[in-house]
Amino acid sequence: MIVMRDAAQKRIEMFLRKGSNVPVDLKGKIVFYAGPTRIVDGRFAIGPTTSERMDRYLKMLFELGVLATVGKGERSETARKLCREYRRIYFVAPSGAAAALSERVESLKLLTFENLGTEAVYEIQVKNFPLIVAIDSEGTDIFELIKSTGGGDRA
C-alpha cells in the first residue's frame, strides 16, 4: 500500500497543475490514509485517519490509477459516485488500533516528500491486514446500509 494523507495529495495535485511528473507511481496501488508515527527503538504505529476530508483528491487518485483507498469513517456522496464511476473500492481499517496494525506491516519505505514528516509518502508491505469493504465498486456504502436498516440509531 501507498501511505499518504492530505499534504502529500495536495502536493501531487500541484505537480499535476504545473504539468510536472508526479514523483510516485500510483497505478495499480492501494492508498492508505494514514501517517506512521515513530515510537521507541525504530518501531512505529500506523492507523487510519478520517477519509472524508480526502474526498477532494479522490478523482485525482483514481485518474492516476489507484485501485482502492483505505481509511476510517464515512465518505461523501461524491466519493460513492466516484467509486461507482471508476469501479473502485473504499476499505476501512480498525480505528484506535495503530500499534496492533503496525504488527501487520512487514516493511516501511519512504518514497517521497520526506520534509512532510508523518505526511510523507511511504510504501508498506502488509500481511493479514484487517480491512472491511465500506464502499464497493457499485457505490454501495456499508454506512448507508446500516443507517437505512436502523442499525445506526443510538439509544
Image: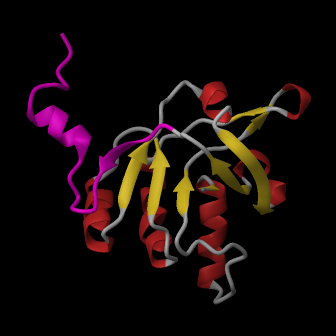
Quadrant in the picture for the N terminus: bottom right
Q: Residue furthest left?
A: 149
Above or below, 7 against 40 in this view is below
Q: Give yes or no for residue 64 being in the magenta stretch.
A: no
Which coloring applies here?
secondary structure
Report the number of discs.
0
**Relative to 94, 97 lies left or right:** right
**Relative to 68, 13 lies left or right:** right
Q: Residue furthest bottom?
A: 19
Above or below, 145 against 25 in this view is above
Q: Residue furthest top?
A: 155
**Relative to 43, 75 lies left or right:** left
Above or below, 134 against 41 in this view is below
Asked whether 94 or 80 is in front, the reply is 94
Measured as percent of width and height from the top left, residue 150 is found at 10, 26
Measured as percent of width and height from the top left, residue 103 is found at 67, 32
Measured as percent of width and height from the top left, residue 155 is found at 18, 10
Q: Residue furthest front?
A: 128
**Relative to 54, 108 lies left or right:** right
Above or below, 100 against 37 in this view is above
Residue drawn at point x = 42 percent, y = 70 percent: 59
Residue drawn at point x = 82 percent, y = 32 percent: 43
Residue drawn at point x = 67 percent, y = 67 percent: 11
Q: Give yes or no for residue 143 being in the magenta stretch.
A: yes
Residue drawn at point x = 48 percent, y = 73 percent: 60
Task: Please provide the residue range marked out in magenta.
Answer: 130-155
